[in-house]
Image (tube, grey):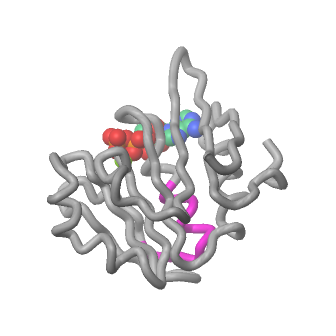
């Protein structure tokens, strides 16, 4: 189960603040699993998180290439599994090897649910009637993250 916390992110500034709070909390080997319908802000959150992790290059959605790699404070792999149909296809990307010694951020993580390691931080993005929120479930205590 782990620790659960909800954040209201009605503006891009709110999402940026959330990314700023989470970035220093991350450790090598962590997997950030992002869930949420189209356009709920998974890529935008990833862009801000990468900025706070010291990535200076452009962070773009890897929906066609499936995986991008960046370098900042850590090596970062950014995946978008929207076009993936099975966990076998995910395995072909070499996911297990890439989890090590880096931070891995996965959009549409439900496509790889059975492959996610124990040290995964899950974030669900929701957007309805102009209200946005992010629900975080972490295996490490996140209670000090102020909502
Ligand atoms: N908290 C927010 N408040 C307002 N707008 C936001 C917020 N977060 C993201 N956006 C905007 O919403 C749009 C969609 O965001 P984004 O591309 O990150 O969604 P996504 O979940 O990655 O979508 P997809 O599933 O298609 O990859 C972008 O224009 C982005 O700037
Ligand atoms: Mg996206």
Taking the image as shown, residue 86 lies to the left or right of residue 124, namely: left
Q: Position of residue 49 (x, y in %)?
A: 57, 62
Residue found 75% across the figure and 55% down from its top: 142
Q: Position of residue 128 (x, y in %)?
A: 51, 19
Residue found 69% across the figure and 38% down from its top: 7
Q: Quadrant of the C terminus?
A: top right
Examine the structure image and report whether residue 48 is included in the region drawn in magenta: yes
Ligand 1 shows up in the quarter that is top left
Residue found 51% across the figure and 76% down from its top: 29
Rendering quarter of residue 23: bottom right
Q: Name above or below for residue 48 compared with residue 27.
A: above
Q: Name above or below for residue 30 compared with residue 1.
A: below
Q: Nearer the viewer, residue 57 or 124?
A: 124
Rendering quarter of residue 20: bottom right
Q: Nearer the viewer, residue 111 or 18?
A: 111
Taking the image as shown, residue 12 lies to the left or right of residue 70, namely: right
Give the residues in magenta. Answer: 46-57
Q: Position of residue 2 (x, y in %)?
A: 66, 50
Examine the structure image and report whether residue 37 is included in the region drawn in magenta: no
Taking the image as shown, residue 5 lies to the left or right of residue 98, namely: right
Instruction: Please tell me how many numbered marks the rendered image carries.
Output: 0
Q: Name above or below for residue 18 compared with residue 118.
A: above
Residue found 56% across the figure and 20% down from its top: 130
Q: Name above or below for residue 10 compared with residue 47.
A: above
Q: Residue furthest top?
A: 129
Rendering quarter of residue 22: bottom right
Q: Position of residue 99 (x, y in %)?
A: 41, 74
């Amino acid at each position: 189960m782990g620790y659960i916390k909800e954040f209201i992110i009605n503006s891009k500034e709110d999402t940026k603040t959330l990314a700023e709070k989470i970035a220093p909390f991350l450790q090598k080997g962590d997997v950030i699993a992002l869930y949420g319908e189209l356009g709920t802000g998974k890529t935008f959150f990833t862009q801000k998180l990468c900025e706070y992790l010291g990535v200076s290059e452009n962070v773009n959605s890897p929906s066609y290439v499936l995986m991008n790699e960046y370098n900042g404070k850590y090596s970062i792999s950014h995946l978008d599994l929207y076009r993936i149909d099975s966990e076998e296809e995910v395995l072909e990307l070499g996911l297990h090897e890439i989890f090590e010694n880096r931070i891995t951020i996965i959009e549409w993580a439900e496509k790889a649910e059975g492959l996610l390691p124990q040290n995964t931080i899950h974030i669900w993005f929701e957007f309805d009637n102009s209200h946005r929120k992010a629900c975080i479930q972490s295996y490490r205590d996140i209670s000090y993250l102020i909502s």
